[in-house]
Image (cartoon, rainbow, N blue to C red):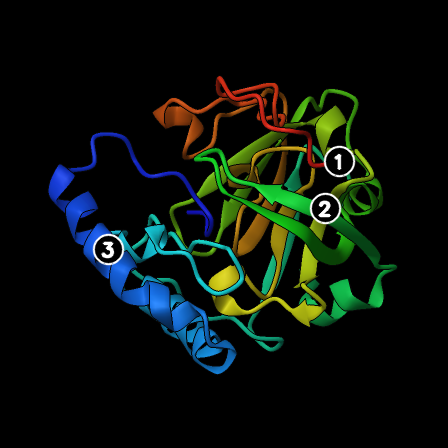
Amino acid sequence: MNDEHPEERGTPIGRRVFLGTLALGAAGVVAAPPLQRGLEAFLGGAADKDPTGLTGLLPNGGGFRYYSVASSVPRKDAGSYRLTVDGLVDRPTTYTLDDLKALPQTRMVRDVQCVTGWRVPDTSFEGVRLSRLLDAARVRPTAKAIRFTCFDGTYTESLTLSQARRADVLVALRMQDKDLGHSHGGPARLYVAPMYFYKSAKWLSGITVTDEVRPGYWEKRGYDVDAWVGRSNGRDDAPTS
């Protein structure tokens, strides 16, 4: 799954008509800041329980759109969250949330670009550079790629090893100067700044080093594996970094 995400292809037209009705009703609400915050909370909670994906196409007050490909997602906190780094490494490691917070943090501010066309400017993310976790695990010479898994039990993503080592790829713990909430993929998510947002997998639970790229959830459904903003998926958006 991913929170700000493309529709699955072949969506029935009835769903879009119903969405239009909901959007008209929500338009006036978004204008008032207190109600806007309430709308964000409602959409985030509703998305967790919405197997239809309707809430995924509604913009919340921050410009993001919630989407889940799982009918429900368990909640994790500092006591229950774990992130495993394994595969073609000499030092497999499991991190708690406190472990990740104790590592040096990197903060970036970039536009977020969805492959469906919407964009959220100047969005801050903060977390641990993925390259730091890979270096600590001692990646083996035969490694070529990374497979990411999520604790929703459904969503997966991928990067080549060279892409994963970029300085603008994070295991993000904070967004918009707040700890990542559940609806935005907390406690930790992947953040791939120069690629379309479906690459930034929410609810990250596993980083597995592999010998080949294994296409992720949306890539198996037709989206590009190398998802550079403005240079993939038939789009010409301005770069985000």
Judge by depth and name the residue closer to the eye, 220 or 89.
220
The answer to whether residue 178 is above or below residue 66 is below
Name the amino acid, label 2: Arg
Q: Residues within 10 Å of mark 2 (few under 14, many from 20)?
A: some
Q: Nearer the viewer, mark 2 or mark 3?
A: 2
Q: Is residue 58 left or right of residue 179?
A: left
Determine which residue is flagged by label 2. 110
Residue 116 shows up from this direction: yes
Question: Nearer the N terminus, badge 1 or badge 2?
Answer: 2
- Residue at 79% of width from left, 22% of height from top? 141
- Residue at 69% of width from left, 40% of height from top? 193
* Residue found at the very far bottom of the displayed protein: 34
Per the image, label 3 sits on a secondary structure element best described as: loop
How far from the left and from the top, in percent, is residue 83?
Answer: 62, 57
Determine which residue is flagged by label 1. 241
C-alpha separation, residue under disc 1 versus residue under disc 2: 6 Å
Per the image, label 1 sits on a secondary structure element best described as: loop
The answer to whether residue 96 is above or below residue 118 is below
Determine which residue is flagged by label 3. 51
C-alpha separation, residue under disc 1 versus residue under disc 3: 33 Å
Q: Are marks 1 and 3 in contact (CB under 8 Å)?
A: no
The answer to whether residue 157 is above or below residue 38 is above
Name the amino acid, label 3: Pro
Which image quadrant is residue 22 in?
bottom left
Question: Nearer the N terminus, badge 1 or badge 3?
Answer: 3
Q: Nearer the viewer, mark 1 or mark 3?
A: 1
- Residue at 77% of width from left, 67% of height from top? 101
Which image quadrant is residue 168 in?
top right
Q: Are marks 1 and 2 in contact (CB under 8 Å)?
A: yes
Question: Nearer the N terminus, badge 2 or badge 3?
Answer: 3
Per the image, label 2 sits on a secondary structure element best described as: strand
C-alpha separation, residue under disc 2 versus residue under disc 3: 30 Å
